[in-house]
Image (cartoon, rainbow, N blue to C red):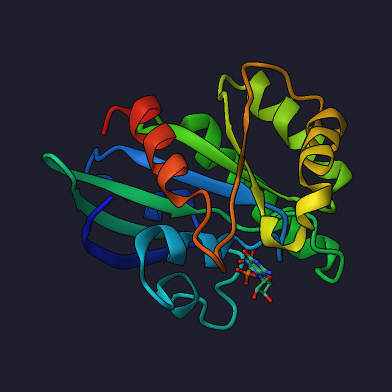
Amino acid sequence: MKILTAEFIRSCVGPEQFPNGGLPEIAFVGRSNVGKSSLINSLLQRKSLAKVSRTPGKTRAVNVFSVVTGDVQLARFMIVDLPGYGYAKVSKSIRAQWGPLLEAYLTDREEVRIVVLLVESRVPAAQDRATIEWLLSIGHLPVVVATKVDKLKPSERVAGLRRLGAELGLDDRLPVIAYSSTTGEGRDRLWTVLKERTRI
Ligand code: GDP
């Protein structure tokens, strides 16, 4: 996938700040530290785009990027980086603030063409399974991506990914895409799936 432009648009702390240009949106969710910023940077082939937007106090915001790709024809869409969930160090009151924002974004917006759920290859969190069930219940069939797959030894890979699928309760509707932002593995496959599923 050829990325022509990728720009940070803004950090939204309330639904009124969500973009209103009507462009298709690809949303990324996952628990904190799962490798979400690294994956967005890797997908967009930009070194520090996702992290650049992480000014202090904004890490619980919904970060929006505008992207133009040009494989065969030009496609213009938004990448939306949703706040990481389940971060133990965050106080309950902060959690109470960002939960509704994430929920408002995922339940109310027609622009959301697809939700990409990131889970760690080696250590899926209990909350990941609950998130998948919740996404399904609100009508989103997520693309599940197993991050940091380079951390699995070649000998543990197949069994490891199978175990991950079982722990998350995945079935044929929800294939897992193995991804490594370090090696770039999975990038082409993820773009292919995103293009197929979003028709961007
Ligand atoms: P975020 O909090 O979900 O945005 O996670 P980050 O992208 O900041 O990554 C969290 C940590 O995992 C960092 O120390 C990254 O260097 C590391 N990391 C992210 N992706 C990979 C990967 O594909 N492979 C390996 N080995 N480490 C990764």
Query: Which image quadrant: the C terminus?
Result: top left
Left or right? Give the position of 4 relative to 140: left
- The residue lying at 55 percent from left, 53 percent from top is 82
User: Between 162 and 170, which is closer to the camera in this rendering?
Assistant: 162
Which residue ends up furthest to the left in the rendered image?
73
Left or right? Give the position of 123 relative to 15: right
Q: In which quarter of the image is residue 150?
A: bottom right
**Vertical order, 157 against 167 (above or below):** below
Left or right? Give the position of 111 relative to 55: left
Which residue ends up furthest to the bottom in the rendered image?
56
Residue 135 appears at what percent x and percent y? 64, 29
**Vertical order, 172 against 169 (above or below):** above
Residue 31 appears at what percent x and percent y? 72, 55
**Vertical order, 74 against 122 (above or below):** above
- The residue lying at 51 percent from left, 41 percent from top is 105
User: Between 17 and 44, which is closer to the camera in this rendering?
Assistant: 44
- The residue lying at 36 percent from left, 61 percent from top is 44
Which residue ends up furthest to the top in the rendered image?
172
- Confirm whether residue 101 shows in the render: no
- The residue lying at 27 percent from left, 63 percent from top is 6
Residue 115 appears at what percent x and percent y? 52, 37
User: Between 171 and 62, which is closer to the camera in this rendering?
Assistant: 171
Ligand 1 resides in the quarter of the picture at bottom right
Residue 14 appears at what percent x and percent y? 49, 55
- Confirm whether residue 170 shows in the render: yes
Q: How many numbered tags mark residues here? A: 0
User: Between 123 and 96, which is closer to the camera in this rendering?
Assistant: 123
Q: In which quarter of the image is residue 11?
A: bottom left
